[in-house]
Image (cartoon, coloured by chain):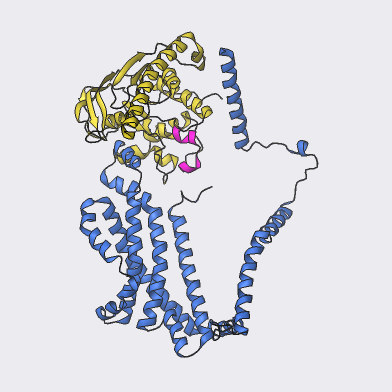
Chain colours: A yellow, B blue
Amino acid sequence: MSLPALNTVTGVEPGEMEMRGVYYSFGEGKEVLDNVSFKVEKGSFACFCGPSGCGKTSIINLLAGYTVPDMGECLLDGVPVSGPGADRLVVFQETALLPWMTLWENTLYGPKVQGKDLMGEVADRAEELINMVGLTGFEEKYPSQLSGGMQRRAELIRALINQPKVLLMDEPFRGLDAMTRSIMQEYIIKLFEHSGTTILFVTAELEEAIFLGDVAYFLTVAPATVKKRMVIDLPRPRKFEHLTTSNFVELQREAIETVDEEAQKAFSAFVKAKEKRTK
Amino acid sequence: MAQEITIKIKSEQEALEAGKAADDGGQVDWSNKIGAYREYSALEKFLRRSVRGMFNYSNLRKILSLVIIVILWQLVTTYKIPPFTRVPSPNEVWKEAVAFIPSTHCLMCVIFSMGRIYLGFMIACLIGIPLGLMMGWNRNVKNFTFPTFESLRPIPVISWIPLSVIMFPLTEHSIVFLVFLGAFYPIVLNTLLGVESVRADYIQGALSLGSKPRHIFFDIILPGALPSIFTGMTVGMGLAWVMVVAAEMVAGGYGLGYMTWESYILIAYPRIILGMFIIGACGYLSSTVLRYLATKAMPWRSLF
């Protein structure tokens, strides 16, 4: 399947997302993040990998401004984050399209609540974005009438129409079948390579992280901290052919080793906790 | 290895494209494959479908179950098996129905009961839905009202009848009040439940997009709670009918409940059963109207 040609419609000014010594907990004894620091450069694609339950979603929530860190700070272009804003948009794990709005209404929801003129330029851009992800003709459909892959694409353009500086993606392809997933990866690569938005992409799949990202951060088990920063020097534009180059395989081996170490640690901690309980 | 993977991806894409072509209305020519395939005419298709639809075994069984009940009813009343010794037979009820249903008296009873339901139910919606929404929206409102609400709720609404007769000098008012009370609790509770069940990421997403509180309330909370609100209204409608019949039997006046009770006093037994049937039919009609309103109000729910 050939993807429709992309136009540079996003016109996005990419932002620089930074976390500086962030500690976060759900309360006493439930530490989630333990001194997390990183800096995602303007216009780069950063992937976050880690064992499940290690606090990846917490990182997204903190950067989005839904929650506040116990210590440390989150910065966008050097300015501390204070509350949610349309400059950092989140694409959620499960589709968060509003079921009672059509695709068109969903797409224009951001501009609508920001009090923008919905005719003219915004409508043109919406049309172009919808065309770009191959959803033309589905504008009047409700989310429940779209397939899983279509919903994810709709979510992407609902965020992109607001020209965010940073896109925060929290396992956005979770629950998609392998085929849809590979098509979505193709879309996100094209979107990224044409728009140049900074993307923070949380995923549990190592292969996906290496295939998509410029840089991958590996997190430890909870309370999480950055265990390793891995620069992925595969050429862009990314193609599926890259999946089999020796460079890719080498990176993948390195990633598996890193994650395996954490998995062993998590397992032995689990066994110890269990022994304690049985005593 | 490299080639294998590209080939795999390519074939997946081909499969997808083929699927898409079929979705787009691309006709697959089955005639070659099935051989003796023949196109039916439109009339033929319609007849086949409707006959199959009406007289399939599933529907026949459903009709049979109703027929069996009526036959049983006829048997127990003809042979006067206790406790059915004084129960009128289907035949008597049918004769009464033919005589009574077209009368003005019947019409007035229906109009009175329906009017009381309509008024009481409307007031319950107008107060209950906003109250439930506010309770879910604002913690202070909930803290202030929920304890009172929860301590009054276990009292069966029927037990309010004597008090409401004392409270309102006019019978009409006390009946409407009781209908209101019956519908009120389920409407408030379900509305509150609906607000609390709205997914957090809808609200977070909307906040990120720049929504102000009024947008969150009208674009997210209200439509998100709507399915639950309609559930509350349906349950409330059922209780409203319970209350109107009970209140009419006690407080009197016109109405289906009063008519049924009066038939007992006047020893017009077939009419008792007829009254029960009419009440049932009216109740069914009201919930059908509600269901229709629900599908109109939530077009995104009844697709496919």
Q: Does the magenta stretch include residue A144?
A: yes
The percent coordinates of residue A32 (x first, y second) are: 27, 30
Q: Is residue A82 left or right of residue B70?
A: left
Residue lying furthest right? B36
Residue nearest the observer in this picture, A14 or A89: A89
What secondary structure prevails in the magenta region?
A: helix
Q: Does the magenta stretch include residue A140?
A: no
| Residue A141 can be seen, yes or no | no
Residue nearest the observer in this picture, B286 or B1: B1
Part of the protein shown in magenta: A142-153
Residue lying furthest bottom? B266
Q: Is residue B36 left or right of residue A75?
A: right
Instruction: Please tell me how many numbered marks the rendered image carries.
Output: 0
Q: Is residue A84 left or right of residue B75?
A: left
Q: Is residue A58 above or below residue B245?
A: above
Q: Is residue B301 above or below residue A255?
A: below
The picture quadrant where one finds residue A111 is top left
| Residue B213 can be seen, yes or no | yes
Q: Is residue A258 above or below residue B181?
A: above
The picture quadrant where one finds residue A73 is top left
